[in-house]
Structure formats: structure tokens, C-alpha cells
Image (cartoon, rainbow, N blue to C red):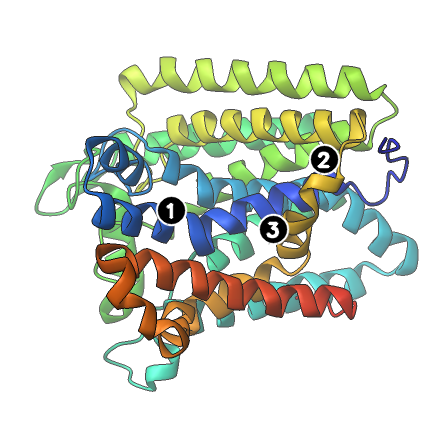
Amino acid sequence: MDKPLINKERIMSIDVLRGFDMLLIIFADQFFITLHKGAGSSFTGVLAKQFDHPEWFGSAFYDIIMPLFLFVVGAVIPFSMDNIIKVNTKKTIIYRKLIRRFIILFILGWIVQGNLLALSASEFHVFSNTLQAIAVGYFFSSLAYLHLTKKARYALFVGCLIVYTLLLTIPVVPGIGRSQLLPDYNFAIYIDRLVMGRFVDGTQYTWVLSGFGFVATTLSGLFAGELIKSNLPRKKVVLQLLLYGLASILLGLVIGIWHPVVKKLWTSSFVLLSSGVCFLLLSFFYWIIDERGKYKWAFPLKVIGMNAITAYVLSHVISFPQIADYILFGLEQYVGDFYGLTKVLGGFGILYLLLWYMYKNKTFIKV
């Protein structure tokens, strides 16, 4: 029987949850989409639809991926920042570390979705990627952990939601009128275009003012990390994570009646709804792995989670299914319509072997 984990400085459930999130990013969406292309059934169509973003209002399961990434980053802050503080007594050294990580994440975001490698100013996007949203959320949440009391951090969380909600509803957009939660009619997209000009990504997603939501989402993860790091018994931690999750979902749904859930705007109702789901996921993983001690099954997810940034960047820069195609092309005559799924499975296998080799050799790339 697996033994309960007792190391409070390394919570395996957080690593596994990060790996679960990365599995959704680097594999699950392609898996269900290509599965539906091969099967063409109504059931696989429902699954594939859950791994695609809604056009505007509402939410699908796929929408939880980016918030969960930010949430997990926040959950680690109480552990990582305390370790940094123990080693570095000077605040200036800590600030340099935070700024360094902020810059690296932004550059990686430029490489992944900012078209930096195209070496063309006409194709470059300044702010358009999950890693850059993480940079914003991590930087300001870490500063809040360093300088604010726990009550003040909760106040900051609420303040971010209120301020962003007001910014999306009160200002007048030049040439359009009062800001509305609609594509091209909201104040957030107006600010993006004003600030980034020709370097805007050209989508309906918003980034600059959405930073309020990114910070709030990361702070929600920070609150979860503080709860886990506390001296509460594990069973009480599980229960509180569960209750926080249910309360946040309920509040998000209620607020969503007036201020709709829009992932592309990262509305405050979306922050509450997605954070609630993240709390529920963490409560489940924490209960199974850290409270009950059942963790052997989660080894593959841990392998992915320990090198999450590497997995994310590589999967976006390199087409592993295309690499698999060079090896598996002979199978197409046998699998027919399922060859796309075969390439996705093969590509994931290649990426996982690389991550497993890094894990086995204790090579962990962090920023």
C-alpha cells in the first residue's frame, strides 16, 4: 500500500495537477478532435466540442486549461517564495528574481505565439500567450505575498474583480459608445489596440486590462497553496478546498447572470467560475495523493508536471505528430480515417519519452 506523503515543502498533488493540465494542453484536445474525425459519431462530437472554446459567451471544459495553469502557479508561490526569502534576506535580490522570471516568460510567449521566430515586425505580437498571462499573474501575486497581509491579499483579489468589472461596463469606447461585453465593443479590446497598436494579435482575446483577471486567478491559487501549507489536518484541507470551490462556482454563476462568463475577456464571473473548478480539482488530487497516499498511478502526470514549461513550449514550437508521421506513415493504409489520431498518439509518445528521459536524469528546466 502507498504511504501518505509527509513532505510539506513538495506537494505531489500540485505537481500531478500541473501535469494533468499540461496533458490537456499538449494531447487531449488533439486526441478528441482527431478521434471525432475518425469516428464521426455524435458522442465523439460532444467530446470534441468540449475541447474547443465557445464562440463568445459560456464555457466548455477546454476553458479550464489556462486558468488551471495560472492557479497552479499561484498555489506554488507560498512554498517557493518562502524558500527564496530564507536564502535571500535582501528584497532587491528577490525583486530581480521576479523580474527575471517575468521577462523569460514573456520571451517564451513571444516564441510560442508571438511569432518572434518569424523575425518579422509585421507578424510580431506583443501580448498574446498563456505564458505572458502567467508572467503578469505570478509577478503581482508574488509581490502581494511579500508585502501584504493575508486579509489584504483577499482584499486585492476582490478589488481586481470589482475594478475590472467596472472597466468593462462603465467607460465609453470612442466611436462605439458604452462598453459592452461583446466582440469589438468592449473597453478591454479598445485598450489593447490603443496600447499595442499594430502589434496586437488580431483576435477577440484581450490582454492588458485582463491582467486584473490574471492576477485574481493566480491569487486564488495562492490562497489554495496557503491552505495546504497551513497546519490544518489534511482532511480539513480537503474539505475547505472543496467548499471554496463550490462557493466560488456558485458565486460565479450568480454574478454571471448580470456579468456574463466570457473567457476571451477573462470576465470576473469567469475568474470565479474557473477558480472554483480549479479548487475542486485540487481538492480531488490532494485527497487522493496527499491525504490517502495513493500516488503511484500519477507517475506519468508527475513526469509531465515536473517539466511543464518545457512540455508547453516544445509542443507549440515543434509538431510532434508530424515527426510521428515520418515513422508511422505505413500504418495509414490499415487505420484509414483514424490515421490522424494515430499521429497524435505517436507524437505524444515521442514528447513523453523526452520528458521521461529528462525526469530520469533529474533535468528540470525552470524559469
Place residue 4 in its image quadrant. Answer: top right
Q: CA distance from mark 2 to mark 1?
A: 26 Å
Q: CA distance from mark 1 to mark 3?
A: 16 Å
Label 2, secondary structure: give it: helix
User: What amino acid is found at the position of numbered circle 2 in the picture?
Assistant: Gly
Q: Nearer the viewer, mark 2 or mark 1?
A: 2
Q: Nearer the viewer, mark 1 or mark 3?
A: 3
Q: Position of residue 199 (x, y in %)?
A: 28, 70
**Image height check: is 232 above or below 139?**
above
In the picture of the structure, the residue carrying the numbered disc 2 is 225
Residue 6 is left or right of residue 348, and the answer is right
**Image height check: is 116 above or below 248?**
below
Label 3, secondary structure: give it: helix
Position of the C terminus, as image quadrant, is bottom right
Residue 365 is left or right of residue 169, and the answer is right
Residue at 20%, 32% (x, y): give it: 42
Place residue 72 in its image quadrant. Answer: top right
Q: Position of residue 266 (x, y in %)?
A: 37, 39
Residue 352 is left or right of residue 150, and the answer is left
- Which residue is nearer to you in this view: 146 or 222? 222
User: What amino acid is found at the position of numbered circle 1 in the picture?
Assistant: Leu
In the picture of the structure, the residue carrying the numbered disc 1 is 209
